[in-house]
Image: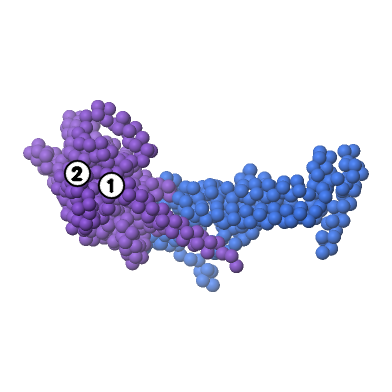
Chain colours: A purple, B blue
Amino acid sequence: MFKIGGLVEELKGWFSTEQAKIKARAADLEAKLTKQDLNPLPKETKTCLSDKISDLIPHSVHIAAVKSQLEEAIERWQSDSTAANSLVILVSPVEPVEAIFKEVLAEKDPTKLAIESLPHALRSPDGSQTKERILEKLDLSQDRKSTLTAIPDLSWCFLRCAEGLEAIEHLQEMILGDRERFWLIGCNNWTWQYLDCVCNLSSYLEQTFCLPTLKGIELKDWLKPVSETIDFEFAYDLGERDRKSIDKDKSELNPDGEENWTSESEKRYYEHLAYISLGLSRVAAKLWLESLYAFNSEEEDEDDDKDESKGDRKPFIFQRATLPELPSLTKEDRYLLHSLNLHGDMTLSELALSLGDQERKIQRQVRSLQRSGIIEAKSAAISLNPRYYPKVRTNLDNNRFLVGGL
Amino acid sequence: MLDFVDYFNLKYYSLVVFAQTNPNKPDNLSQIFSEITTFKVIQGVIIIAIAYGAMWATQKLMSWLSEKVPLRFRLPIKQSIPFWRAFILGFAIVLLIDLFLTLSANNVLALTGTVTVALGFAFKDYVSSVIAGIIGLFEIPYQVGDRVKIGEHYGEIVSYGLRGIMLQTPDDDTVTIPHNKLWTDAIANTNKGNVEAQTVIDFYLAHDVDIDRVIQILYRVARTSKHTQLKLPILVVIQEKPWGTHFKLKCYPIDARDEFIYRTDLTKRAKQIFAKYNISYPPLPAREFD
């Protein structure tokens, strides 16, 4: 009996074989055209560069934007008794809002305004004690002076479970009731969308500011401390469609054209990087690192006598940055990824509670997604790999999930 | 066998009657049918086989494709299946008519009358279903992918055929229902071409429970479920009964197919919170135990 399942399997097999052949041919062709034999980056070099990227402070554009918005909002709050006493900074789930807040608050003068910042570990294991934990961290004395209270990430204050939203509701009441306190709140777009749907958050926190995305030249400047430590060159070619998109964006975003590029290929590389990473620094940094290759040194030694021109060659080369393909996702995988974007990083038990599933079941799923590289686990915290963020966002949006902006 | 003979006798009789009474009658009845040759028969068989194969392949391909694409594209692809099938069938019929019949204005009239009379007697219910199916394509009381209740049967429409639809019930049974139910039965469609379908979950609690607290819990439970489509409204309604208070939680899952998992998730989590806050259930009347 002829089975459709067998036919599909055969077609799948044929498709993957043909795809592999095409990819292999494309790689051969690329190697022939560029006359380069490339290797992935050595593990030590990659780890070293990755650590350096992690140590980078957020881009000055972000810090300056938040700082100026904060100063204006505080000024309004101090001069006008009806002005909003809060400012929400909306960011992408993969942007380092905590680090931005750290830099902004470090520059504030504590003598003018007392500063307190809520720490990361606020969520309680079952989500019901978060409110108490927040209250413990706040100075609630009657005789305190005007205070700037920072919540670097609002997703720390809730967990998507029946009792996990109480802290948010309490915060809403506190913000409305305590005008001696100015609240600076960082919130990822997905959390904001969700909390606005379930708690009408925008009615309480009316003043919001979206963190700007980064352009090509800004990404180049931000990554400069890392790129300076290696000797590299650029070698790639852009597709016609991407070039047009970039040109269009460029004409809209950079009418002055005052940019400090050292070469055309560098400019093309970074503008393409900004385009595919949606201007998000952490996504761009991951893609930047993945697009870096090393020349095959053994081959080079053998060919030294044949081609002396290769002696000028630098040890590393940037190929055109590309977004990684998403592996096939199940419905349960999508729920998990949505939860991760909603909460930022979280522990396995928090993730299980947020999904309403058993921890053992989630653990298997997490391992599988971790193997495919979509999610990362650092110590106990699980989070989405920023490289996959643009495609995960599109995928969830196409599957009717409530997704936030960039 | 008798039916088959009767049908052809009837057909021949109606053709003769029609030809005798119709002022536009063809000069010769044999002019309606073109000359039948072995080659034409083979062509006819090939057309039927290809049409059958194409309909089968379209059904399988579209069903497979609809499960592979993102959720937002699933139903439009599934809903196109009946149109593809109708197109293939119509095309095959036109080819067969062209092959075996000589079509002139008079012949078409004669043939239409004949076929109508013949089918009217022999396949009344079948024709009724086919016509209802064609009308259903345009009136759209249901489409492939919808979750409908017809009579006692509830489930997702997995196939829209010439004669009827096939429902897949929550127990994974397949029920075939003829289209002519459209004429006589009420059809309840829960999602009407959308991927979301409203789910109503009933909770029965004692009269003395704190109503506000229960409503808050039910809203919270719905809003924090991973399955809930937050772009659509959530509602809690109450109805007093002699034995207790009936709460209805109305909300939508992201994918209507998850309806029963969704119900389970909401019920489980609501009951956990009810237990935590000692929210009591209505006492069962003594006769229930008898």
Q: Earlier in the sequence, mark 1 or mark 2?
A: 2
Q: Position of residue A134 (x, y in %)?
A: 21, 51
- Splitting the image into 4 quarters, where does residue A241 fall? top left
**x 34%, y 44%: residue:** A404
Disc 1 is attached to a residue of which chain?
A
Please tell me how crowded label 2 is: few (under 14), some (14-19), or many (20+) other residues with Cα within 10 Å.
Answer: some
Q: Position of residue A189 (x, y in %)?
A: 31, 44
Query: Going by the image, does A388 lie left or right of A301?
Result: right
Decide which of A290, A25 is in the foreground and name it: A25
- Residue situated furthest front in the rendering: A306
Q: Which mark is residue A319?
A: 1
Residue A300 in view (yes/no): no
| Residue type, label 2 | Leu
Quick one: B12 or A251, which is closer to the camera?
A: A251
Q: Residues within 10 Å of mark 1 (few under 14, many from 20)?
A: some
Secondary element at tag 1: loop
Q: Residue furthest bottom?
A: B290
Badge 1 and badge 2 in a common chain: yes
Question: Which residue is depicted at the point 38% across and 47% down?
Answer: A394
Tell me the residue at 57%/48% (across/down).
B79
In the rendered image, the quadrant that contains the C terminus of chain B is bottom right
Check disc 2 and report the residue beneath it. A223
- Whether residue A263 is visible, yes or no, is yes
Whole-number angstrom distance, CA of label 1 to CA of label 2? 16 Å
Residue nearest the observer in this picture, A141 or B60: B60
Q: How many marks?
A: 2
Residue A216, given in percent of the width and then of the height, sits at 25, 38
- From what the image shows, is residue B268 above or below residue A96? below
Residue at (57, 56) in percent of width and height:
B60
Residue A167 locus on image (x, y percent): 27, 50
- Element at label 2: helix
Label annotation for residue A5: none
